[in-house]
Image: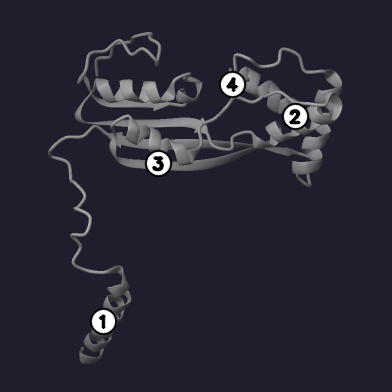
Amino acid sequence: MPTHCVMADEEFLPFQENTFDLVFSSLSLHWINDLPGALRQIHRVLKPDGVFVGAMVGGETLYELRCSLQLAELEREGGFAPHISPYTAVTDLGNLLGQAGFNMLTVDVDEIQVHYPGMFEIMCDLQGMGESNCAWNRKALLHRDTILAAAAVYKEMYGNEDGSVPATFDILFMIGWKPHESQAKPAKRGSATVSFADLPKVSRTHAGNKTDNSSTS
């Protein structure tokens, strides 16, 4: 399959409107400054009935590390600064996709826990992955005493029996379609002919029919 590589900024997609049948994004959208604007651009470059499939880090990712650093810094320095990147909540993702113009949305979250010998190994791994704190106003220095206290808090609050500590990553998955007249549309509100209150009756009737059929055979 012929391919064409373009190096571009996700916030300024260099493509014309209605260009692609599919846009796929894998674990990069959590670095976007303007996520609503980026989703609108993805919607713009898709053809009608085109689909966007994405995965991003979000939710309660690294909550153990966040909490440990905050408690240690509060105790040692009398206040705390953000040391973990801000993440999008899964409850907000559907709204952002809808506001960008997508329909037939699917949003899901997968929680992954990775176990490390200690907090320092987690921080080293994050730095190696290029996933350190991305906030522009982050604190430049974290005192040694605060780091040591945070490592002790981490192990005390979240440590496993074998001495390891978990690091939680929430991966948010999303699918959204650009509207097209051929797509299935929801029925109008109030057009239903069956009430949800009648569902138990339908279930009992269906079960009775199966019993009658079994006895007849």
Q: Are marks 3 and 2 in contact (CB under 8 Å)?
A: no
The tag earlier along the polypeptide, 3 or 4, is: 3
- Secondary structure at badge 4 equals loop
The Cα–Cα distance between marks 3 and 2, rounded to whole angstroms, is 30 Å
Q: Secondary structure at mark 3?
A: strand
Residue 61, image quadrant: top right
Q: On the image, numbered disc 3 is attached to which residue? A: 107
Residue visible at 33% across and 76% down in the picture: 200
Query: For the point 55% across and 42% down, which residue is it?
Result: 111
Q: Quadrant of residue 8?
A: top left
**Label 1, on which residue?**
205
- Percent from the top left, x then y, of residue 76? 86, 26
Secondary-structure class at tag 1 = helix
Q: CA distance from mark 4 to mark 1?
A: 57 Å
Q: Quadrant of the C terminus?
A: bottom left
Compared with 141, 64 (above or below) is below
Local packing at callout 3 (Cα closer than 10 Å; few below 14, some 14-19, many 20+) is some
Residue for point 72% across, 26% down: 121
Separation of marks 3 and 4 at Cα, in angstroms = 23 Å
Three-letter code for the amino acid on which mark 2 is drawn? Leu
* 192 to the left or right of 13: left
